[in-house]
Image (tube, grey):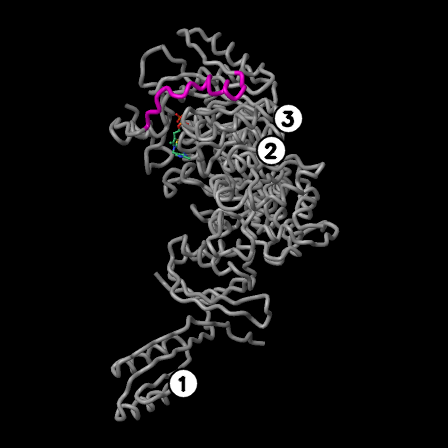
Amino acid sequence: MLASELLIQALEQAGVEVVFGIPGAQVLSLYDALSRSTRLRHILVRHEQAAAHAADGYARASGRVGVVLATSGPGATNTVTGVATAYMDSVPMVVICGQVPTTAIGTDAFQEADITTITLPITKHSYLVKDAALLQEIVEEAFYIAASGRPGPVLIDIPANIQATKVAARPARSCVRLASYRPTLKGNARQCRQAAELIRATARPLILAGGGVISSNAGKQLRELAELIAAPVANTLMAKAAFSPDSLLALGLVGMHGSPLTNNAVQESDLIIALGTRFSDRVTGDASRFAPQAKIIHIDIDPAEIGKNLRVDVPIVGDLATVLSSLLELLGDFQSPLREGWPPTQVAASSPQPSPSASLATETTWISPSEVFFALNHIAQGREMVYTTDVGQHQMWAAQLLQTSTERGFLSSGGLGTMGFGLPAALGAQIARPEACVLCISGDGSLQMNSQEMATAAINGLPLKVIVFDNRALGLVRQWQHFYYHDNYAHTALDAIPDFCSLAKAYHWQARTYQHHGDDATGITEALKWLLAQEGPALLNIPISRDELVLPMLARGGSLAEEVKHV
Amino acid sequence: MSEHTLSLLVDNQPGVLTRVTGLIARRGYNIESLSVDRTDDLAISRVTLVVGAEHTPLEQIKKQLHKLINVHKIYDLTNEDAIERELLLVRLRVSEKQRAEILEICKMFQAQIADANGDCLTIEASGNHERLAALEDMLRPYGIAEFARTGKIALSRCPTH
Ligand SMILES: Cc1ncc(C[n+]2csc(CCOP(=O)(O)OP(=O)(O)O)c2C)c(N)n1
């Protein structure tokens, strides 16, 4: 068979069911073989960046490896933002690129780009296939590397002449072993005991849950630990939906836009149990003043994350679910003591929290974003919702206000903060979870970065839903200009073009613009109900004031205790 | 900033050196010296590199290097009394009179004459960093025409039984 046919067979054997891509000269052989596969579905997107985000959304929503197929040169370079996004958020992905023939490599041939070198800093590993006989092994390795340990994107660059080489297939390997890559799964026993001792002695424990909880499928263990030791749970953006917001232990979002209750709890805690998180600057504020009274237990599968940004008292390298299970066993007989004033969530439960969005504007011509989210939470109850977001104020409001604990039900670009992620990610998520209601929360800036994918959704019958918070501005940047650049709104106005309703309709979507009538809350409920009731893809454009802010917000360079002065 | 010597065993494949050096450069550290060649196993190369960094960033660099799939082993030889060697080639133009003095210096350093033609002399010497630096200092007054020095290669001492 041809190497291209072998590749398709290897993808099938790896359990792949869908590939996102766009063909081109250097992947013709692969597409020819792909067209004959009865098991692989190909989704023809409209931009390779979207192919990568869609594969990413598919992976995040399902826990399986997302697969991208792109041609050489511009096809490959178009995937770069999507690959970087997946790398930053540890999403398992395999990107297959065509390359010019081996004889032409290095000659600046038409559509030649050295994609393996371009993506070196944003891939977990990559291959340039120069020998067709190695292809099967490479594909098996790539899937193993992408999905195991700390997941991440792996790129395979295949020159056109290699694809067209005759090769012999051998039976698939049942397990891949690499001498130089053996992720640690079980935690070190001594360190686990030390962690258990610290937990037994703590008065104010706090669990900081990161994205690792989701990639390790450790939600159950997280809940058991939190309940056993009565520790409140703060989540990073990446861990949203990993812990039920209905629990009295749920603190919600921590860091830059976390509530004072949450951030102060971190500052007052005497033991932070950090699970699968990398202590990013958006989480810690000034790292040297993060949780000043606390000892820190840090559990992560990537040894390089431990001690990278913060001093750690007990490091445990391992798979989160496995390590937490051993910890739970060690704490089997533990009775959590009644503690005065802790967890702080219980204290706060009786007093209502201030609304996180605030407007500089006083007019009632606009609906406030929090009203939209309150209505949405109400309507979404009992449904299997998968939310995706773009990047900006709307993303932060979603992180603060959405009440959801659907497994793998909140997909957002955390580390890279990639505008344009939401819509294609929703596309991938909808394919992974056909039964779920997939809803992309977007902004008028972000949606325009990949709006062409409305075509992909319509043509493939993917019934995604989109809400646009239309503030006619690059809102979050504008907010920074408000706080730090004396309201000099340099180049953050977008104006009222396009009309998103007409745009969506041009792609054969159902679409509506929400009309606000003062304080009447039934209007938004009705509009959201309409959105979720649509059988096909549908968009709801919600005009909001330009002057809305995401609050609270930490002061630049400040600790978690220091909020920006609200003026 | 202190200098650290790392010795890595890596796959002998195209692009692997770029992965290693790129990772270090990306974190803003300068590679002071570098030497690479295959080991007794043709599939494996040894990379010896000297990098200037404080302790904490160095630990982070080592951990990140460990994550590269093509890196098999990392030895930190910094605080070890390792055997370290470099090779030096230096070309001088010398008068008849100076020649004898230079040969005397070569003898002191167990350096060889690698090549000679008329007033041109190429000297070859090996040794550790300090020793070669001392030789360089002694030859400089004669006017160095060309100069080449390898990065260091290093192995830890034989284990004591
Ligand atoms: C690709 C990309 N370019 C630029 C930015 C910088 N940026 C962050 S938020 C933002 C504004 C987003 O505007 P919009 O999508 O309308 O959301 P809003 O903040 O108004 O809710 C920009 C430009 C980014 N995050 N990603």
Find the distance from the CA under tag 1 to the CA under tag 2. Answer: 65 Å
SS category of the residue bearing label 1:
strand
Where in the figure is residue A61, as x and y percent of width and height? 59, 32
Residue behind mark 2: A43
In front: mark 2 or mark 3?
2
CB atoms of marks 1 and 3 within 8 Å:
no
Q: Tell me which corner region of the image, top left, top right, bottom left or bottom right, holds residue B146.
A: bottom left
| Residue A73 horizontal side relative to residue A130, left or right | left
Question: Which chain does the numbered disc 2 sit on?
Answer: A
Q: Which residue is mark 3?
A: A434
Name the residue located 47 percent from the left edge and 67 percent from the top edge. B48
Magenta stretch: give its range: A492-510
Residue occupying image coordinates x 37% and y 61%: B52
x and y, in percent, of residue A392 in the image: 41, 29
**Residue A4 sits inside the magenta stretch:** no
User: Relative to residue B4, is residue A200 drawn left or right?
Assistant: right
Report which residue position mark 1 lands on.
B114
Q: Is residue A501 magenta?
A: yes
